[in-house]
Amino acid sequence: MCNDLRVFENMFLGDEITKRFGMLNRKEMIDRCNKVFRRMKVNIDPCALVADLQAAERQLVEIGKALLFKCELVIMDEPSTALSTREIENLFSIMRQFRDEGVSFIYISHKIPELFEICETYYVLRDGKLVARGSFSDIDENGITEYMIGRQLADDEFSRHVSSSRERVALSVRNLSGKDFKNITFDLHEGEILAITGLHGSGRDSIAAALYGVIPYKGEIIIGGRPVKPGMNIRGFLNHGVIMVPRMRKERGIHKDLSIRDNISMGYFNTKFRRLLINNKAENERFFRQKKALAIKAEQPGNPITSLSGGNQQKVVLSKWIGYGAKVLLCNEPTLGVDVVSRREIYRFLYDLARQGTGIIVCSADIEEILAISHRIGVMNHGELVDIFPNENITKTDILSRSCLRNETE
């Protein structure tokens, strides 16, 4: 999408509606955009700049563009990655409506539950080859997953492999308030994975940003027993041993114009590098070391970062900060847009970090993810941390009921 154009200009790019003398018919294009958005049950201003839209809104604009021109075949590549539960339900409702009108869909996704909900037939690809195909009515989720990863799943594949029995506190937060959140208080222990979840707009993303010095806050933050000075920037948090894996990988996690090796070395350059010249041999050694540690599927260190899949790009984002004495790791949606195999590898990597004593906060809307990986779960609701409880005998319904205290649904 073109960030400096408006929504309707993006949707009609190359197919503009004109009137006499070739002048653009802005009113007609805006009206048709509004009509599509009404059918999609979304509230997006056709005159808004794309640069001002959230990631989910951009995704919906792309979907609206496909539906605008009454296509007979729509190919959707990970369309639900940035969408909320309600937006996904709306998307599926739209797909069923257009299917009944004769439109066909190819739906590319690694989110297996969604596939069973919306699709009728499946084709499974692994390492560039077609390994299975059939009807969803003849297979279950474990069967699809086993085709995808090429082996049978262990019974405890998603169980928590570590237990946090450490008493030392890695991070203390007292009465923290800022954009979209207020009066947040909790302790994160060494070796603990604390998940923070909540509906869209609950404030979970803003907490992660504040704990890394991205946005201003009021309150007290103590890292490893050392109070943080008010107004400290990202560099200061790095020096205190806090690192972050951001939510929007393409916009905030990678340098698209640099190589895989250079992206991996960014953490070192920002924390440890003190020389005048870069040692290519040392950088290559770092590349192969991190490649092995996170099972990054990359051929040569000099290949562009954009040559990797989303899952492998996310591993690079993780790897560039590892090995430099991190006390606290902030992960905002760490497996967003990541395939099932990479997701498990990232989980194992986080388990290993926890075993080494790193305190980890995972901010995520994926309830299955937080049930799989966390020791404790914190639930946000309208900017408040309404509850923190151990991840023991907790169900998805328990979490949703706490995050919808005002009878709202995402």
Image (cartoon, rainbow, N blue to C red):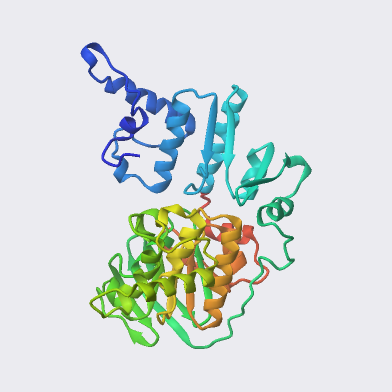
Residue 325 in picture, x, y percent from top left: 41, 82
Specify whether residue 248 is in view: no
Residue 376 x %, y %: 56, 73
In the picture as drawn, the residue positioned furthest to the top comes out as: 20
Q: Residue at x 57, y 64 (%)?
A: 370
Q: How many marks?
A: 0
User: Image check: 55 left or right of 136?
Assistant: left
Seen from the viewer's position, the closer of residues 63 and 202 is 63
Residue in view at x 50 percent, y 83 percent: 190
Viewer-side residue, 350 vs 174: 350
User: 233 or 310, which lies in front?
Assistant: 310
Query: Which residue is nearer to you in this view: 356 or 300?
Result: 300
Q: Is residue 348 above or below residue 114?
A: below
Q: Does residue 307 appear in the picture of this structure?
A: yes
- The image quadrant that residue 211 belongs to is bottom left
209 shown above or below 129? below
Q: Quadrant of residue 96?
A: top right
Image location of residue 25, percent across then percent down: 27, 19
Q: Residue at x 53, y 71 (%)?
A: 292
Q: Is residue 88 left or right of residue 393?
A: left
Location of the N terminus by quadrant is top left
The image position of residue 221, as x and y in percent, is 35, 78
